[in-house]
Image (tube, coloured by chain):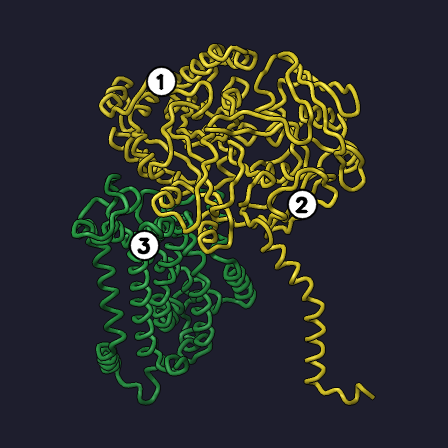
Amino acid sequence: MLSDPSASQPGAGRPRQRSNVRLGQFLGSPKAMLGLTVVILFISSAVFAPVLAPYDPNALDIPSRLSGPTWAHWAGTDQLGRDTFSRLLFGGRVALKIAVIGVSVALSTGLILGMIAGYGPKWLDNLLLLAFDTVLAFPTIVLALATVALVGPSLELVLIIVIVSTVPGYARMARTATLALKNDEFILAERSLGASTPRILAHHVLPNVVGPLLILAAMDVPVVVTIEAGLSFLGLGVLPPTASWGTILNEGYLVINDAPFMVVAAGIPLVLTTLGFTFLGEALRDIFDPRMGRGRA
Amino acid sequence: MALRNTSRRTFLAGTTAAGALILVPDLIGQARAQTAGLRLRMERDNEILDPGYMVGGSEVSAQKQCLPFLAEYDMKDGEVSWRPTYYVTRLEHTDPTHIAFELAEGLVWSKGYGPVTAADVKFSYERMKGTDWSGYFDALDHVEVTGDRTGTIVLNTPFAPFILVTLCHGTGAVLCEKAVTEAGGKFTTDFPATCGPYLYEAVPGQRANFVPNPDWAGPKPAAESVVVQIVGEEKAANLAFEAGELDCTDIGADTLARYRTSPPEGSEITIAGELRYMWMGMNTEHPKLQDLKVRQAIQHAVDVDSIIAGAYSNTTSKSFGIICPGLLGKRDATKSYSYDPEKARALLAEAGVSGLELTLKTLNAQDRLLTAQIIQANLAAVGITVTVLPVDDGTFWEMGMEESGDGWKDLEMWIMQFYTTPDPYEATQWFVSDQVGVWNWERWKNEEFDKLYADGIAEQDLAKREAIYLRMQDIMEETGAYVWINHEPTAYVHRKGVTISTAPSGELDYRRFEIA
């Protein structure tokens, strides 16, 4: 059985050799290393926030409100005297949670739906395509506003909005890849040997379509993080007093004349995370799909 | 022949020039409308200019420019009183239930509707009893017309503040009976007929223009015209003022604090008044809050001083009730509670309550969210877990309304702010028994309170009246359903040389601005 059609192509080499080449390419890419470093920093700071944070992120200290950066408070304090650095670290946990859960669920759902659309009958493909396009046509913020008006803001709601708005992207890509594979010889061979559709999808289609989706997922992480920050900035995200980069940014914006450091402090992790995941995703894409990289260049 | 010689370039140049010639007058007109005279700000479009159905705020300001009023606010040294307007030659109480008036000569409605008459006054005030703002006219019995320009406002009970509360506010606007009747009995975004120094033009979503009324024979306002731009975000309006794009705008608590220490160059701050009262309310019928001891524990647990410092930058005065500073019946202290976390814990223990979880709903505005988070931290310190739930305008204002469904049954705690007029009766009207499920979301009833409300309207003796309103606030506080928070000032920043005129509740009156 051939689960990897590229293995039969001339010059493709053996899988272990190719993996080593790709690892070498990855380690040799400054963009990849920079991205990876930032991503590791982001993940570790979020995971170890309770250890790293010098203060309780929700502890009020009103007499010290809006103090600038000091040795005691590296990123200053907010309007309620809370330590901004501690809140940023805990805000990273919210971002990471949304990114990991949101992207994982969206990726899995999109992958399954996309494979069903690509491999299933034409009417089902059309129906699912219509659903994907309908969701894609709906602006994320409008979707968020409407949903929040109905059920009220919460972290869970942000997750749902993130998943609903990103699933169609994965599904469309999985569908296209499945369509391309659907009539390949190794799939036809499996079918003629009596393999069931779920088996073909799970054992032969899935391994061949998941690679590009993982790259897309890496590049979607900053998108998801900014969606969460944007919704929280608008007051549609996490509930107070939970720290989120978006809420810190919003609070900073409202006191930008008195305490400009808050906006800067909240903006830095957002920018760095976005850059880090984008660099990492681009480097992975360049290595695993060099044609796409050249095309963009 | 000429066409044959016209090149494509010449044709394009010619049509561009012709197009420009057509557009230039309009562009000049727009530029003039946007820059001439005063440049002010409002938050939203004026939706209903009809005084009977208005939302309030900038709509009252528009009414003041275009419609006759019998009385206007007179504010001196923090004291609020009233005085007759240009439109009347006489306005006085002839006895506690009769107010005689005489309209000035020569007042004429626009659009050819003829002179302003006493019959218009009768029509305007008597129709208000059947409108959304009927509460302001509870004391009105009828208006007697005694001549073309003379009449008497007859009250059904002695009510001294009628002129100050009802006639000086937007509700006191006089309408043209014929024009309003022809318009179907009510109107929305345009006045059927006007009689004032300005004519009103609105560009929805952009601005309202007040241009000179050529038929106006009365005193000319200082500003030839006024452009009121719609700037939804208060912070954006503040930046527009700092950039010189506005001559005056309202400012919030944190901006007020900043401007007090470093005002924008060439600017001044005017405080219109403190006729706002904010509190945290509790639903006394909710199973978690039915026990008076639990509510009293919450009263004792909230540190209001921290709220005023943290959420309002110490720019607001601490509240001890619903009667605002400067008004009869203003309390100087709470009677039944003060910030005391130990007492709060003891009351919870007495009530046998532990692990209490509550939801606090608030408007999604920065100051309210900060207030809510301080309350959340205060209550956490005594063992009550609070979820702060920000909600948008539309949802918020229906939360306790029975006519909006059963949502009130789930309502536990909320942060509320009301505006009022310069008389204590207005603030108390929302808490009588009839208001349970309307605006009395705390849902308590008290016969003594209801009786005192009626007594307060009729009482002429100031000392007795003050005692009535003080007692009414005691009753409210004793329900345990209120944590008084603050009285937020309505503040404006404006250019030096521009003296603004505002109602105590903050509505601007452009015609009374002075410009040096």
Q: CA distance from mark 2 to mark 3?
A: 41 Å
Q: In this structure image, what is the colour of chain A?
A: green
Residue at the disc numbered 1: B292
Residue at the disc numbered 3: A260
The part of the image, by quadrant, that contains residue B184 is top right
Q: Are marks 2 and 3 in contact (CB under 8 Å)?
A: no
Q: Earlier in the sequence, mark 1 or mark 2?
A: 2
Q: In this structure image, what is the colour of chain B?
A: yellow
Expressed as whole percent of the image width and height from the top left, the position of residue A49 reads 21, 52
Expressed as whole percent of the image width and height from the top left, the position of residue B161 reads 57, 20
Q: Quadrant of the N terminus of chain B?
A: bottom right
User: Are both tags, 1 and 2, on one chain?
Assistant: yes
Expressed as whole percent of the image width and height from the top left, the position of residue B311 reads 34, 39
Q: Secondary structure at mark 1?
A: helix
Does residue B454 appear to the left or right of B48 in the view shown?
A: left
Q: Chain under label 3?
A: A
- Up the image or down, B308 lies above or below B147; here it is below
Camera-side mark, 3 or 1: 3
Does residue B227 appear to the left or right of B105 in the view shown?
A: left
Q: Secondary structure at mark 3?
A: helix
Amino acid type of the residue that numbered disc 2 sits on in the rendered structure: Tyr
Q: Residue at x 22, y 77 (%)?
A: A27
Q: Residue at x 27, y 43 (%)?
A: A65
Q: CA distance from mark 3 to mark 1?
A: 45 Å
Q: Residue at x 51, y 54 (%)?
A: B245
Residue at the disc numbered 2: B200
